Image: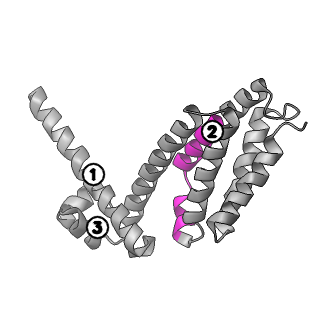
Amino acid sequence: MPKLWSQTIATHHREVRQAILNATAVLAERHGLHAVKMARVARQAGVGRATLYNYFGDVTELLRAWHEHQLELHLEHLSELATTGGSPLERLESVLETFAAICQRHHGSELAALLHRGPHVARAQEQLRDFVRRVLAEGARSGDVRRDVSPAELATYCLHAVTAASTLKTAASVKRLVAVTLAGARRQK
């Protein structure tokens, strides 16, 4: 097969897959995860059901792929927050507030519990813990973050603490949770 042809086919496959994942996101946002059905996704993506089944064998496989894509987007955004602008504590606050807001929005359903299993979630959690650990280590070097607890342990504390946002109802309560978590990470004067 000529190289140009194989590149064109590969690009087409990526675009169709992305259109399917985008359609899944639209349906999930508008109607909830329980409303994501193969026929609805195919219709929303503008592809035939046979084409959809060529990419994903069933709705569970489709939702897992969509979830993996969502995690990648979240990680990109959180990585950017962890590495750009402000002091280490300001960047940590941005990361924790954003992560807490994600936890608050995506909580509780049986389907969410199903999607949060698997190696892709463990990898994402490890990457996030590493972002936070690096910011905390930088903060410890600058004297803003406590040094009596290792940055790795402190990162675990911070992330576990803000996952409690999944049970909170308001943005103000999430902000308070992050403030309390940050207070635990700050160097005591």
Q: Residue at 55% across / 64% down in the picture?
A: 105
3 in relation to 29, above or below: above
Disc 1 designates what residue? Answer: 17
As helix, strand or loop, the secondary structure at mark 2 comes to: helix
Q: Quarter holding the N terminus? A: top left
Can residue 143 be found in the magenta stretch? no
In the rendered structure, are the residues bearing label 2 and label 1 in contact, judged by CB atoms less than 8 Å apart?
no
Observer able to see residue 162:
yes
Tell me residue 186's x, y (percent): 81, 40
Identify the colour scheme used.
one colour
Observer able to see residue 106:
no
Kindly indicate the quadrant of the structure image that contains residue 28: bottom left
Q: Residues within 10 Å of mark 3 (few under 14, many from 20)?
A: many
Q: Quarter holding the C terminus? A: top right
54 vs 156, nearest the viewer: 156
Would you say 69 lies left or right of 156 here?
left
Query: Which amino acid type is shown beneath numbered disc 1?
Result: Arg
114 in relation to 118, above or below: below
182 vs 113, nearest the viewer: 182
Query: Which amino acid type is shown beneath numbered disc 3?
Result: Val
Disc 3 designates what residue? Answer: 41
Tell me residue 58's x, y (percent): 35, 64
68 vs 140, nearest the viewer: 140
Label 3 vs 2, first from the N-terminus: 3
As helix, strand or loop, the secondary structure at mark 3 comes to: helix
Q: Which residues are magenta?
A: 111-131
Would you say 153 lies left or right of 71 here?
right
Q: Residue at 35% across / 69% down in the picture?
A: 27
Is label 3 or label 2 in front? 2
Would you say 20 lies left or right of 74 here?
left
Q: Residues within 10 Å of mark 2 (few under 14, many from 20)?
A: many
Disc 2 designates what residue? Answer: 91
